[in-house]
Image: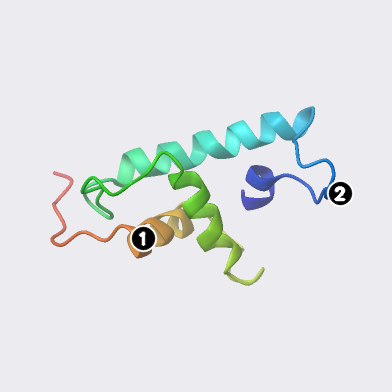
Amino acid sequence: MLQDYTGPARVNDDPFLKGADIVKHQMARGYMNGVKDASEGTQWCNNGRVSHEVNEDIATELRKLTPAQRKGPAAPLVIQALQKRFPCTSVRSSK
């Protein structure tokens, strides 16, 4: 998911996504948005601190992980990144 969000390595003079990379980026962005929506208030909390660049915050946290740590389902990693950046002072039940 991180590779889809950030796109392939590009030369420094062309930082923009192109073609299919744009679609992959949007799909990864939508995935992160779905995980954020499903877990907000129960596993991480906005508390008015979340900026419109929260997906970049998530990507920054995921980049810190080793390739081995990024293996497997992406949702738990996205939630971990959100919990690290935006912890809840008390966790509400989703019921």
Residue 74 visible to an observer of this rendering: no
Left or right: 30 as drawn, with respect to 34: right
Name the foreground residue: 60 vs 23: 60
- Image coordinates of residue 31 in percent, x first then y, are 50, 38
Left or right, residue 4 beside residue 69 = right
Q: Secondary structure at mark 1?
A: helix
Residue 71 point in image, percent of width and height? 61, 63
The colour style of the image is rainbow
Q: Which mark is residue 11?
A: 2
Q: Amino acid at mark 1?
A: Arg
Which one is earlier in the sequence, the residue at label 1 or at label 2?
2
Determine whether the residue tagged by mark 2 lies in a helix, strand or loop.
loop
Residue displayed at 76% across by 42% down: 15
Between the C-alphas of marks 1 and 2, the distance is 30 Å
Occupied quadrant, residue 64: bottom right
- The front one of 44 and 76 is 44
| Quadrant in which the C terminus appears | top left
Residue at 79% in and 31% down:
18
Check disc 1 and report the residue beneath it.
85
Residue at 33%, 46% in the rendered image: 50
Residue 53 x %, y % = 46, 43
Q: Residues within 10 Å of mark 2 (few under 14, many from 20)?
A: few
Horizontally, residue 18 falls left or right of residue 2, namely right
Q: Residue furthest front?
A: 13
Asked if residue 18 is positioned above or below residue 32 in the image, the reply reads above
Q: Is residue 24 visible?
A: yes
Query: Local crowd at mark 1 within 10 Å, few (<14), some, or many (≥20)?
Result: some
Q: Quick one: 78 or 15, which is closer to the camera?
A: 15
Q: Are marks 1 and 2 in contact (CB under 8 Å)?
A: no
Question: Where does the image place residue 26, in percent across and percent down from the top left?
Answer: 60, 31
Identity of the amino acid at label 2? Val
